[in-house]
Amino acid sequence: MATLSIHNHNRDSAGYTYVYPVISRRAGGVSVGINLNPNNACNWACIYCQVPNLVRGSAPKINLQQLESELRGFLSDAVHGDWLQNHAPEGARELQDIAFSGNGEPTSAEEFPAAVEIVGQVLQEFGLANALKIRLITNGSLISHQPVQQALESMAVMQGEVWFKLDRATVDGMTEVNQVSDNMVAVKRRLIASAKLCPTWLQTCWFAIDGVPPSPEEIAAYLDVVREVREHIQGVHLYGLARQPMQLGAERLSALPSEKLEAYADEICSLGVMVNVNP
Ligand code: SF4
């Protein structure tokens, strides 16, 4: 296996089904990904999604025993062996987090709550419980489901956090970018529910479509949502397009200049919210 980079997020890179280490600009080092969607199935179909051969659907049945053994095997190589030395570039040879973030929506797996418990136990065994944060990268659509809420409560006890996707804050915007039909009242309700159960960040990806950035109306609607939820959330992670979108029509998308993203970040910051920008 070659040295990883932020551009190589190949989920097969370590030869496992569920566990995939990546160099993460998000985490600033090696993020241990847990992929509960090896079938590339998601209930959304974001136009910028980087999952190859994405299909609509839910996670398949998860083999929890295999997940546990893969995680133990990888951590053993990384903590007691030379995996970091051999595969991570200099300056990024540190495990940063464990992220439920795979080829689809992790919370669509029936076994998601059990997987959270397993990750917590294995981290304890390796003495990493307080050193590695457990993150859930989610589109938030299933947060109202009781088992998902229980898992979020467990994550909170483990000092975990949720990154809740909000790319557009209008019905038309979500329909275009995330290819789902949802309403903003429900989205805000789920977001606040998530934040009450476990510390929650907004995760937002902004880019141009056919050379056109998000419209002033979209930006205003987004800022309105942030204003409404700001006392509940930890902050905002604002992303550009760093990796190649893998969906049909990807050629229509382009990254915004970093100054533009920074200017958007300043607007969000002016609402009294912490913003991390990753152009
Ligand atoms: S929610 Fe995530 S995995 Fe699902 S389509 Fe969007 S970017 Fe891809």
Image (tube, rainbow, N blue to C red):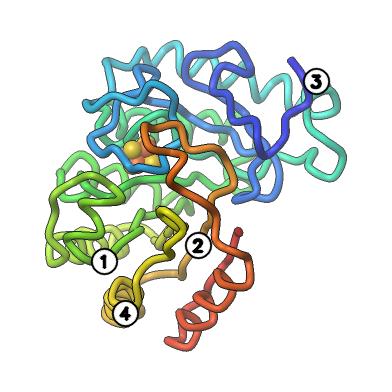
Q: Nearer the viewer, mark 4 or mark 3?
A: 4
Q: Which of 197/59 is in front?
A: 59
Q: Give the CA separation, mark 1 to mark 3.
A: 45 Å
146 displayed left or right of 214: left
Q: Give the CA separation, mark 2 to mark 4.
A: 17 Å
Residue, x 28% and y 80% (percent of image)? 224
Q: Nearer the viewer, mark 2 or mark 4?
A: 4
Hey, what amino acid is under mark 1?
Ala
Q: Assign a secondary structure to mark 4.
A: helix
Please name the residue that numbered disc 4 is placed on: 220
Q: Give the CA separation, mark 2 to mark 3.
A: 33 Å
Q: Earlier in the sequence, mark 2 or mark 4?
A: 4
Q: Which labelled disc corresponds to residue 5?
A: none
Q: Nearer the viewer, mark 1 or mark 3?
A: 1
Please name the residue that numbered disc 2 is placed on: 237
Q: Assign a secondary structure to mark 1.
A: loop
Please name the residue that numbered disc 3 is placed on: 81
Report which quarter residue 20 is drawn in: top right
Residue 152 in the image: state x and y as whole percent. 32, 48
Hey, what amino acid is under mark 3?
Gly
Q: Is residue 159 visible?
A: yes
Q: Is residue 110 visible?
A: no
Q: Earlier in the sequence, mark 2 or mark 3?
A: 3
Residue, x 15% and y 44% (percent of image)? 146
Residue 80 in the image: state x and y as whole percent. 78, 23
242 displayed left or right of 3: left
Report which quarter residue 217 is drawn in: bottom left
Which quadrant does the C terminus fall into? bottom right
Q: Assign a secondary structure to mark 3.
A: loop
Hey, what amino acid is under mark 4?
Ala
Q: Residues within 10 Å of mark 3 (few under 14, many from 20)?
A: few
Note whether 250 is above or below 41 in the view shown.
below
